[in-house]
Structures are given as structure tokens and as C-alpha cells.
Image: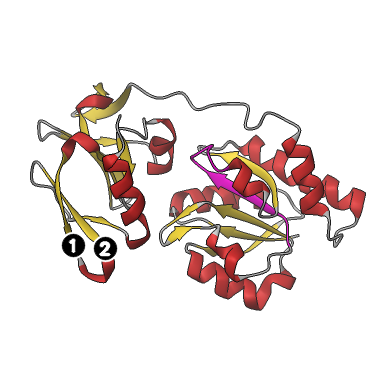
């Protein structure tokens, strides 16, 4: 079966591909990382795809935009660090909904669910997504709620040191390594992906402004316009790169800043 993977975190896409292709009957034919690329690809090649694994938060916006521009007829397995999009996923060909960080077994269970539905109804039966929606709607899903993390282990010289979340100003991905920056100016490496971090931090306190950076609301000094309708977040101290809010995240970011904790 041909699988399309849409995921903007390279390591996550590689891991997902590895899990899928461990099953002999599945082949990942394409990996995409944006809404725009997915729309263009589906318009040309959807008939050659059997299943799509779709990340909800992509670099250029939420992947639900895809369904506004293309009539998607294939089953979709949504992957996300958030549990708040379940109902919206169900309305967009959602066969299953996997919370990040996912495990190998999560992927296989989703593939089995699609295969069982296809065997029961016929591979090209037009009601596969609708049947799946009815099944998912009857269960309290997702059952496992992520536990908010109060501290992270970081590498400091030759030791692992716990750092309280409230002391972290921002997380930054640089050269495939995520670093933690404290309000005291200290920088340490943390051996987790941004997706993993995003899944277990308080979203009232932290916001992922782009693919490389998650910022603490307390660290924000002010905001100024940037080209192409983006914005730059100025923090209370110097940082290695400009903290640029991607265009499609500007509105939710501003709303988040105004939202009371």
C-alpha cells in the first residue's frame, strides 16, 4: 500500500517512515512538509495513494486547509502533539488520531484499523472515513492525556541536570539539536525533539512560534512587524537568531499573549 507522509519535523518524518516501511506491504512514496506542497501533490497524485499520515501543525499553517482546497478521498491518520483537534480531524477523513510523541505500536494499530475497514467495506468504498468517524465518535478518544512536565533533564558538562520549566525562557532547534535557554542566560542541550517537548509543556505558558523555537510568555518583551506579514518577538535578553513568528501563526500568537493565564 502506498503511503503519503506529511510532517515538517525531519526526524519525526524519518521515524514515521521507518515504522511504516517495517511492514512489508507498506511503502512511503512521498514525504511532504507543508500545506502548499500537500495540496499540489494531492491534486496530481491522490489516486496513487492509499493512506495519508498528516501532521496537523505544519510550517505554513494547519493541515485542515488542505481539505478546503482538495477533495480528499483517501483515509487520513492525523498526527499531532495536541489533543484539541479530535473533532475537526473526524470531519476530514480521519481514520485515526495519534498523539505525539508516538510509539511504534501506535502506528501499527492505526494501519491495522485502516486495513480492517478496507477489508470489511472494500478498499475503494466511499464510506470508509464515515464509518471510521462513527467508530471513533463512540469512544472517549484520545484516552491518554499528556502529563505536563515540570522539569527537563539537560546536559551540563558531563552531568545531566534537571531544569524547572518555569526557569526556561525558550527552546531552540539549531543544527538538529534542541537547546534550552534559561532566564539566567545559560544554554544547555536537551535530547528531545521539539514535538516531544511541545506535547508535555503548558501551552498557556509556552507557544511554538515557528519550526525552530518555543518561547515562554514571560520572556516576551515586545513584538514588531516583519516582512511578509510575519512578526519578530523581542525577548528580554539577546538570542542567537531572530524570534520570527510565522505568518499563519501571528493571529493565534497575539491571541495567546492576550489570553489570561
Badge 2, how many Cα within 10 Å: few under 14, some, many 20+? some
Residue at 53 percent of width and 62 percent of height: 65
Residue at 50 percent of width and 37 percent of height: 101
- The colour style of the image is secondary structure
User: Between residues 105 and 61, which one lies in front from this camera angle?
Assistant: 61
Q: Can residue 117 be found in the magenta stretch?
A: no
User: Between residues 256 and 70, which one lies in front from this camera angle?
Assistant: 256
Badge 1, how many Cα within 10 Å: few under 14, some, many 20+? few
x and y percent of residue 70 in the render? 63, 70
Q: Is residue 119 visible?
A: yes
The residue that mark 1 highlights is 225
| Circle number at residue 230 | 2
x and y percent of residue 100 in the render? 52, 39
Reply above or below: 186 against 251.
above
State the CA–CA distance, disc 2 to disc 1: 6 Å
Q: Residue furthest bottom?
A: 44
Amino acid at each position: 500500500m502506498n503511503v503519503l507522509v506529511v510532517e515538517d519535523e525531519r526526524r519525526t518524518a524519518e521515524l514515521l517512515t521507518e515504522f511504516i516501511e517495517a511492514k512489508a506491504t507498506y511503502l512511503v512514496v512521498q514525504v511532504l512538509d507543508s500545506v502548499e506542497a500537500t495540496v499540489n501533490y494531492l491534486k496530481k497524485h491522490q489516486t496513487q495513494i492509499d493512506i495519508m499520515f498528516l501532521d496537523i501543525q505544519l510550517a505554513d499553517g494547519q493541515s485542515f486547509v488542505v481539505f478546503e482546497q482538495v477533495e480528499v478521498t483517501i483515509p487520513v491518520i492525523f498526527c499531532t502533539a495536541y489533543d484539541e483537534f479530535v473533532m475537526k480531524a473526524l470531519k476530514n477523513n480521519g481514520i485515526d488520531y495519534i498523539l505525539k510523541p508516538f510509539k511504534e505500536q501506535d502506528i501499527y494499530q492505526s494501519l491495522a484499523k485502516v486495513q480492517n475497514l478496507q477489508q470489511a467495506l472494500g478498499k475503494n468504498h466511499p464510506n470508509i472515513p464515515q464509518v471510521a468517524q462513527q467508530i471513533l465518535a463512540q469512544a472517549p478518544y484520545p484516552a491518554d492525556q499528556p502529563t505536563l512536565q515540570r522539569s527537563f533533564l539537560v546536559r551540563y558538562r558531563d552531568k545531566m541536570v534537571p531544569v524547572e520549566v518555569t526557569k526556561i525562557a525558550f527552546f531552540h532547534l539549531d543544527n538538529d539539536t534542541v537547546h534550552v535557554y534559561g532566564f539566567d542566560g545559560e544554554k544547555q542541550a536537551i535530547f528531545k525533539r521539539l514535538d516531544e517537548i511541545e506535547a508535555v509543556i503548558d501551552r498557556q505558558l509556552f507557544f511554538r512560534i515557528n519550526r525552530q523555537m518555543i518561547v515562554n510568555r514571560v520572556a516576551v518583551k515586545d513584538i514588531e512587524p516583519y516582512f511578509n506579514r510575519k512578526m519578530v518577538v523581542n525577548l528580554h535578553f539577546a538570542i542567537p537568531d531572530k524570534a520570527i513568528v510565522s505568518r499563519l501563526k501571528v493571529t493565534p500568537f497575539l491571541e495567546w499573549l492576550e489570553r489570561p493565564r
